[in-house]
């Protein structure tokens, strides 16, 4: 992320594959990275919108640099994004049909969590 390398979004889970957990401390940075790339805003433009130096934005996107969650949240809000939190029972995940019933198949949260963009910040 810090070197502007491509970090793909999660894809739909296929039979035999397992979810790869993302450490909580990196989720915000990853969401911000995807938002910046999706919107096509430069780091300098984001810095201008946040009224901070560009180095601050570079650090926000650097996984090896600690960034307060409030700063990440503010940057996402400026881009019209937010992080949505969810958790599952890791020992015994519900089958897909049970999750559909619980969340409602047409719901935005269901589509985000069980479609192509699990873990992405949503609108």
Image: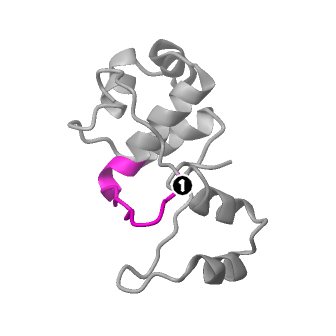
Q: Judge left or right: residue 48 versus residue 19.
A: right
How far across and how far down the image is residue 70, in percent?
Answer: 44, 47
Sort mark 1 into few (<14), some (14-19) or many (20+) by Cα contacts within 10 Å: some
Residue at x 20% of width, y 37% of height: 64
Q: Where, by quadrant of the figure, is residue 24 drawn?
A: bottom left
Magenta-tinted stretch: 12-27
Between 70 and 1, the one nearer to me in the picture: 1
Locate the N terminus and report the quarter of the image it occupies: top left
* Local SS, label 1: loop
**What residue is rendered at 33% in x and 19% in y?**
55
Quick one: 102 or 57, which is closer to the camera? 102
Picture layout, residue 40 above or below residue 24? above
Residue lying furthest right: 106
Q: Nearer the viewer, residue 69 or 26?
A: 26
Q: Residue furthest front?
A: 15
Q: Quadrant of residue 106?
A: bottom right
- The front one of 96 and 66 is 96
The spot of residue 97 in percent (x, y) is 65, 80
Q: Position of residue 5 (x, y in %)?
A: 34, 24
Q: Residue furthest left?
A: 64
Q: Quadrant of residue 89?
A: bottom left
- Residue depicted at x 35% and y 85%: 91
Picture residue at 42% right of the left edge, 47% below the top: 28
Number of marks in picture? 1
Magenta stretch, main secondary structure class: loop
Task: Name the residue carrying label 1.
Answer: 12
> Is 21 part of what is drawn in magenta?
yes
């Amino acid at each position: 992320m810090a070197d502007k390398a491509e970090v793909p979004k999660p894809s739909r889970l296929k039979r035999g594959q397992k979810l790869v957990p993302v450490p909580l401390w990196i989720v915000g940075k990853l969401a911000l990275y995807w938002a910046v790339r999706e919107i096509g805003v430069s780091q300098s433009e984001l810095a201008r919108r946040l009224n901070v130096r560009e180095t601050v934005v570079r650090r926000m996107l650097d996984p090896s640099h600690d960034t307060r969650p409030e700063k990440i949240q503010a940057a996402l809000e400026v881009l019209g994004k937010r992080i949505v939190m969810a958790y599952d029972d890791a020992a015994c995940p519900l089958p897909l049909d049970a999750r559909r019933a619980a969340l409602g198949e047409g719901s935005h949260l269901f589509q985000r969590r069980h479609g192509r963009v699990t873990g992405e910040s949503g609108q």
